[in-house]
Amino acid sequence: MENEDQIHITDPEGILILLAVVLIYLGIRLLPRFLVGFRNFIPAAEVKRRLDAGDNLLLVDVRSRSEFAGELGHVRGSLNVPLPELATRLKEDAALMDDGRRTVVAVCRSDARAAFAVRALRRAGYRDVLVMSGGMLGWLADDLPVERGDG
């Protein structure tokens, strides 16, 4: 005996609900890419390869200090500048981001905050700015080394 209050996937309402959930999920996942451009994402493994090759990369981790030091850890040598502080710190400390000639790679937990950081960095004049695709979750999924603690 079926409950008449249930919505089935074959019902028009069920199909609309499923479609709405899929669209919301895709919107959330694709928003960072629309903000900074699909070509401005770099896979974690490529970041690691470039670091190992000695490329002039500056990793800016825009997570909170507790996230930076927490269970996901952080990439060795990355600079922790929480996203809410980024604009202020760029204005206060001209040397914060080096001389502007380095490729800056923004990092966060996944990649959403990093996309917002890239927009702020571009407004501040930085041109060679990328987002590490997948953030620290992507880094860990590729089984790459992390540091924990304040770093």
Image (cartoon, rainbow, N blue to C red):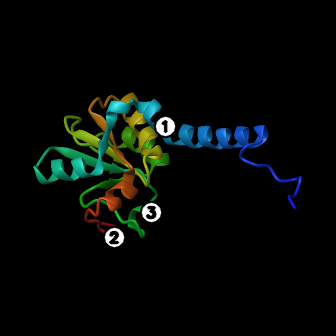
Badge 3 or badge 2: first in the primary sequence: 3
Q: Which residue is mark 1?
A: 30
Instruction: Please tell me which residue is depicted at 19% across the width and 35% down the height of the picture.
Output: 101
Q: Which residue is mark 2?
A: 148
Badge 1 or badge 3: first in the primary sequence: 1
Q: Nearer the viewer, mark 1 or mark 3?
A: 1
- Where is residue 136? Give x, y as percent: 37, 57
Quadrant, the C terminus: bottom left
* Kind of residue indicated by mark 2: Arg
Which secondary structure, mark 1?
helix
Disc 1 vs disc 3: Cβ atoms closer than 8 Å? no
Q: Which residue is mark 3?
A: 67
- Where is residue 115? Give x, y as percent: 43, 39
- Where is residue 37? Give x, y as percent: 39, 29
Say left or right for 16 vs 92.
right
Which secondary structure, mark 2?
loop
Q: Is residue 71 above or below residue 58?
A: below
Q: Nearer the viewer, residue 8 or 135?
A: 8
